[in-house]
Image (cartoon, rainbow, N blue to C red):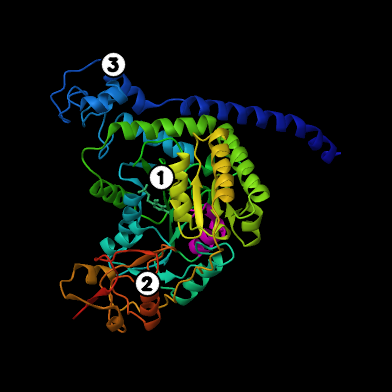
Amino acid sequence: MEGVRSSSLLPGIFSRVGSIMKKISKSLAVRQSKAPLFDTLLAHAKRNVISFHCPGHKNGRSIDKELKNYTGEEVYKFDVTVFDEVDSLHDPIGPIKKAQELMAQAYGVKHSFFLVNGTSVGNMAMFLAACDSGDSIIVSRSSHKSITTGIIMSGVWPIWIQPKIDQNLDLFFNSTYEQVKDALDKYPEAKAVFITSPTYNGVVTELSKIIDLCHRRGKIVLVDEAHGGHLIFNKQLPESAVTAGADLCVQSTHKILSAMSQGSVLHFNSKIVDFNRVKKIVSMLQTTSPNYLTLASLDLARRQAFLHGEENFSRVIKVAEWGRAYINNNIHSMKCFTRSEMQKLGFDLDVTKLTVNVTKTGLSGYEIENILAKEYNIQLDYADLFNLVAITGEGSNKSDIEAFVNALESISKKYHGKQKNWILKIPSLATEMVMKPREVFLSSNTKKVSLKKAVGHIAAQTLTPYPPGIPVIIPGERITKEICDYLIDMSSKDIRIIGQEAEMLKTVKIFTN
Ligand SMILES: Cc1ncc(COP(=O)(O)O)c(C=O)c1O
């Protein structure tokens, strides 16, 4: 009888819960439809205030005419400096504070910091905020170069995870759950784990599992989610690091969402990292003259994504998936991996990114990137020997994708070469970290020796061949014969090696005691 009574109450309870939820989401949408920083700047710009503050162009008046003719003058009225009305990025109490609070609310985190030097500065801040000098941190070797900077600045000992390479897809991956677990078992002293997800190619690792494991072991998790600011706003996309529980996570709001270049956000959502330390460090690393147009664009990008992300990204997903299918079904010399292929490999995929493998065309990715730019007026974000990476974003539309796949189809018909048998490989990077990267970087006890003579010495520089864009030496590491042989081999090929100080890579900088 009791059971019958309670089950007859259920529909009523559900409908009341449903209506409460509707009210909450409506009031959230009302709050999220505000853009306090943009509104303040717009009101300020409209008043044509006489400027006796920096910058010197005075509301755009002295901006070069040629530039102004193209852009119009109004936009420069947003380029102001710090004063009470527009608030300070370093100690916000007004519209910047409100805009950051709305950002934090949109992502469901405790606090969001606006960044004006991209995710690069956010990565450096995460290292400095989470670790003390001498701490060790587990980090994938396939990380952005700002991670090496963060390691040098913070004086930590990196414990590297060697990225897995897939020679069928000519691709390397981010750290897996098993790799992180192995590293934690082997190095229980590590204070934190640094993950990059998604990768440049949109491949997402098992973040929830990794973060749960790290938290159970009392480790801080830092995530470079430069390419994932949009994930939380569409149900079809993979899980974001903020939902998965990262302590700190940085996103380039300018990459896929609609903020201006350099606009990024660092999200704080930790019980173990000291918030005040994060705040101090973010302030230490940022300019005192932030670009307010960039700041306002962060406010607007958040509003747009919160209110329209579901619809906008559903459109982008649809057209990107259409493009992927078109390439895979119609262009036989090119291949674009799919979400289900990635899932079979234990990863997930942000399908808005198109990675097109071109090895069967007989041309390199660089060559096709060039042809696309010169003959088809299409500019990609990235290419390497094997792949092209087309990054779509909130502003992408079907005609962009059509132009891209039509161009690829015509290139595949027009240009032929012999299929290349380049192989994506890296040497074993499980080398001895003899000194902290910071110590070697700041030392003047260095000299250059020929590559062949570097074996056994401690590296005093970073060298990163592209592809795969993974540093094969880092300051403080013992240089092995395998690494030397690899670099000698790379330097004789058409491979860019970032960090070399002369036209050809012949020497390497070592530490001399
Ligand atoms: C994975 C990753 N992290 C960080 C960055 C740096 O981001 P930003 O350009 O916003 O400084 C990039 C840039 O391409 C990136 O690909």
Residue 427 belongs to the span the image colors magenta = no
Q: Kindly give the residue lying farthest to the right in the view shown.
A: 1
Q: Which residues are magenta?
A: 198-216
Q: What is the x, y in percent for residue 418?
A: 55, 63
Amino acid type, residue under disc 3 in the picture: Lys
The answer to whether residue 225 is seen in the rendering is: no
Q: Is mark 3 within 8 Å of ligand 1?
A: no
Q: What is the x, y in percent for residue 94?
A: 30, 29
User: Which disc number belongs to residue 114?
Assistant: none
Which secondary structure, mark 2?
loop
First of labels 1, 3 by sequence position:
3
Q: Is residue 458 above or below residue 329?
A: below
Q: What is the x, y in percent for residue 433?
A: 33, 77
How busy is the neighbourhood of tag 1: few (under 14 within 10 Å), some, or many (20 plus)? many
How busy is the neighbourhood of tag 2: few (under 14 within 10 Å), some, or many (20 plus)? few
Is 72 situated left or right of 17 in this image? left
Is 61 situated left or right of 113 in this image? left
Residue corresponding to mark 1: 252
First of labels 2, 1 by sequence position:
1
The answer to whether residue 20 is seen in the rendering is: yes
Q: Is mark 1 within 8 Å of ligand 1?
A: yes
Q: Quadrant of the C terminus?
A: bottom left
How busy is the neighbourhood of tag 3: few (under 14 within 10 Å), some, or many (20 plus)? few
Residue corresponding to mark 2: 492
Residue corresponding to mark 3: 46
- Disc 3 to disc 2, how far (Cα)? 59 Å
Residue 204 belongs to the span the image colors magenta = yes
- Disc 2 to disc 1, how far (Cα)? 35 Å
Amino acid type, residue under disc 2 in the picture: Ser
Amino acid type, residue under disc 1 in the picture: Ser
Q: Nearer the viewer, residue 127 or 7?
A: 127
